[in-house]
Image (tube, rainbow, N blue to C red):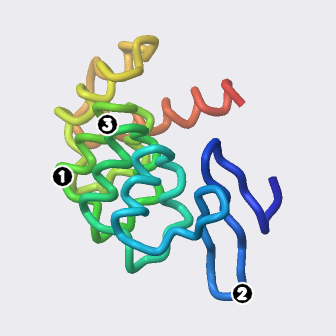
Amino acid sequence: MTDRNISFKNYSVERKHNGWIIKHGANKLESEEQYLIAVQEEPYLLKYLPKKYITFELCLAAVQKIGIVLKFVPEKLKTKEICYTAIKNSGYAFDYVPKKYRTYELYNIAERSCWRDIDNTLCIEGNETDILDRIINHIHTVRKKRN
């Protein structure tokens, strides 16, 4: 994989002077419907889509399959629904949730989603903001250990 060509199972991405070209086999994707199908099959393609094709429906489809691709959803499309869907799929998407949606309820969804090993002492005392800060620090610690 290089900066110019990226391969997925059924798709390839090529860097051109004016952006990325996404292909399915030898065919270039050119319609909203084709991009939606592609993202449903390969959610990480969201990172390379032309901005004019990135819609709420497309982003929702991507995070329904792989929550962590919330990081590629444009900020203006990060709605409460998209964020909650991403977190239900992957608690680690919490890092990419805008602060206005970061609630204790959302943290609890994330914990049930994938943080089975989270240290319970994170939530023993403190206000909601302190708890959320400790959760984010914990996520970074866990990621560093895994890398």
Give the distance between the C-alpha atoms of the residues marked 1 and 2, in whole angstroms: 35 Å
Q: Is residue 27 above or below residue 96?
A: below
Instruction: For marks 2 and 3, give the CA distance.
Output: 35 Å
Quarter where residue 14 is shown = bottom right
Which residue sits at x=77%, y=62%? 5
Residue type at mark 1 is Lys
Q: Amino acid at mark 2?
A: His
Which sits earlier in the primary sequence, circle 3 or circle 1?
1
| Numbered disc 1: secondary structure | helix
Disc number placed over residue 80 in the picture, else none: 1
- Callout 1: few (<14), some (14-19), or many (20+) C-alpha neighbours within 10 Å? some
Which of the two discs, 1 and 2, sits closer to the camera? 2
Residue positioned 25% across, 40% down in the render: 85
Say left or right for 83 vs 18. left
User: Eyeballing the image, is 114 above or below 127?
Assistant: above
Sequence-wise, the earlier of marks 2 and 3 is 2
- In this rendering, position of residue 115 left or right of residue 60: right
Labels 1 and 2: the sequence-earlier one:
2
Which is more toward the observer, 97 or 1?
1
Tell me: residue 18, above or below residue 25: below
**Residue occupied by mark 3:** 87
**Quadrant of the rendered image containing residue 108:** top left
Query: Residue 137 or 89: which is nearer the viewer?
Result: 89
Q: Quadrant of the C terminus?
A: top right
Residue type, mark 3 in image: Ile
